[in-house]
């Protein structure tokens, strides 16, 4: 456990929350404990409440501050929790003044991988999602500011930067999209070794972004898609903007253009009205799309969303379907990893020094740390074996 005087931040939810928590951790003062919660589903709100209670038990003397979507959407309920001392609005949680810090108070902080939020909010109003209530309309950080933040992260020691957002593929800085932002980052920060992206809406991947994803070697060959389902009727009821065939065609095009690219996807199990046939289509999508990295979410109704008013699937069935989706993705991952044995991979060395990730996001365990490749550096490793969920390698 951290020393009582050290700030502590508990993060729930997406990569954007992870990115924001890194900033909060640097701004929060001594003896402050923060829960940066998620409100995208009813379960996420329950998890946020549970995290608050756990953190209060662990840090009884700290000032406990809550921020994030859950408390933004139901401020009165969270403020009434006896464990909570203060709530910081979502729109203010990255401001130094919210934490009593001076402006421009972010010190350099060495990290192997840095998460940077560059886009916030969403305009699409999917029927299962409460994000517009918690984060508002789509808006982008200015590209010039993003470039400066990436350069600062690299100067502080980051080899890899993950650009994150609620609806990242819809990034729009006065007409300049995500592809333009990536091109500027890569051109103006030549010391940056690796770039990753958080989840992308398939419908928003235009030709320019496709070209950067498939042709730029410093953009890692790992595309995580916000699929949510693999059945057209369920996608329509979700109010998504892609079809099953369109998503699979995009995956095929990505792989044809970049053979070493892996696919991840967000998938919801047991969306309202989903029957066995609809679920079978989603399940088959994992195999057809060779989706190795699946983030599977059992559907839970979020009050105030249209999906919460639709006919619900039995919770036991939802959990069973989620497990089957995870098993299918684990099978794809296992076969993918087995095919990597004998290859040489550039591994970002992560704590505690005997592990990291290959460019395609495969997890790698090293047989021994290397004194010549410290944490945060990139080393070439020969892959000697594959377990069910990770590779085993030796630094060359």
Image: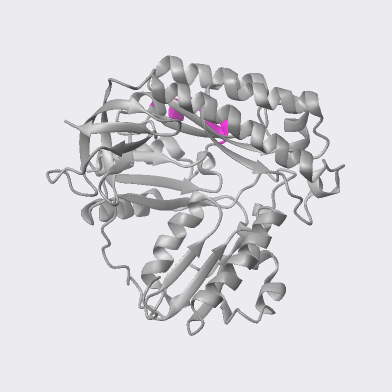
- Compared to residue 287, the image places residue 84 above or below, namely below
In the image, what residue occupies the spot 64% across and 43% down? 297
Q: What quarter of the picture does the C terminus occupy?
A: top left
308 left or right, relative to 8: right
- Compared to residue 343, the image places residue 92 above or below, namely below
Q: What quarter of the picture does the N terminus occupy?
A: bottom left
Residue 143 in the image: x percent, y percent? Answer: 39, 48
Residue 44 in the image: x percent, y percent? Answer: 65, 56
How many marks on residues? 0
In the image, what residue occupies the spot 59% across and 27% down? 328
Prevalent SS, magenta region = helix
| Residue 18 is covered by the magenta coloring | no
Question: Which sits in the foreground, 277 or 101?
Answer: 277
In the image, what residue occupies the spot 50% across and 71% down? 34
For the record, the magenta segment spans 201-211
Residue positioned most to the bottom? 61
In the image, what residue occupies the spot 28% across and 27% down? 383
Residue 225 in the image: x percent, y percent? Answer: 54, 33
Q: Is residue 144 visible?
A: yes
């Amino acid at each position: 456990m951290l020393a009582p005087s050290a700030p502590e931040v508990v993060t729930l939810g997406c990569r954007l929350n992870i990115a924001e928590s890194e900033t909060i951790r640097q701004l929060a003062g001594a003896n402050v404990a923060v829960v940066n919660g998620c409100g995208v589903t009813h379960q996420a709100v329950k998890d946020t409440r549970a995290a608050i209670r756990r953190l209060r038990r662990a840090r009884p003397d700290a000032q406990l501050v809550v921020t994030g979507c859950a408390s933004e959407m139901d401020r009165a309920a969270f403020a009434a929790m006896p464990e909570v001392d203060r709530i910081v609005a979502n729109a203010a949680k990255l401001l130094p003044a919210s934490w009593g810090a001076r402006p421009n108070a972010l010190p350099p902080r060495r990290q192997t991988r840095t998460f940077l939020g560059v886009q916030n909010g969403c305009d699409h109003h999917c029927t299962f999602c409460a994000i517009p209530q918690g984060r508002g309309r789509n808006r982008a950080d200015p590209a010039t500011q993003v470039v400066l933040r990436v350069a600062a992260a690299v100067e502080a020691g980051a080899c890899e930067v993950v650009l994150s957002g609620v609806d990242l593929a819809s990034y729009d800085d006065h007409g300049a999209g995500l592809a333009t932002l990536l091109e500027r980052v890569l051109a103006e920060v030549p010391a940056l070794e690796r770039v990753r992206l958080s989840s992308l809406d398939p419908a928003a991947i235009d030709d320019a972004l496709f070209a950067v994803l498939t042709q730029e070697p410093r953009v890692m060959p790992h595309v995580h898609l916000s699929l949510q389902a693999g059945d057209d009727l369920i996608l329509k009821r979700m109010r998504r903007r892609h079809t099953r065939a369109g998503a699979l065609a995009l995956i095929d095009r990505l792989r044809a253009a970049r053979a070493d690219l892996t696919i991840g996807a967000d998938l919801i199990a047991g969306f309202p009205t989903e029957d066995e046939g609809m679920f079978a289509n989603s399940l088959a999508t994992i195999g057809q799309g060779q989706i190795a990295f699946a983030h599977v979410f059992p559907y839970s109704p979020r009050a105030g969303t249209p999906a919460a008013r639709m006919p619900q699937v039995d919770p036991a069935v939802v959990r069973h379907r989620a497990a089957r989706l995870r098993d299918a993705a684990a099978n794809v991952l296992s076969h993918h990893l087995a095919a990597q044995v004998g290859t040489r991979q550039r591994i970002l060395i992560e704590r505690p020094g005997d592990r990291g990730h290959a460019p395609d996001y495969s997890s790698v365990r090293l047989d021994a740390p290397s004194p010549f490749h410290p944490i945060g550096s990139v080393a070439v490793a020969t892959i000697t074996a594959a377990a069910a969920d990770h590779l085993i390698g030796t630094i060359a």
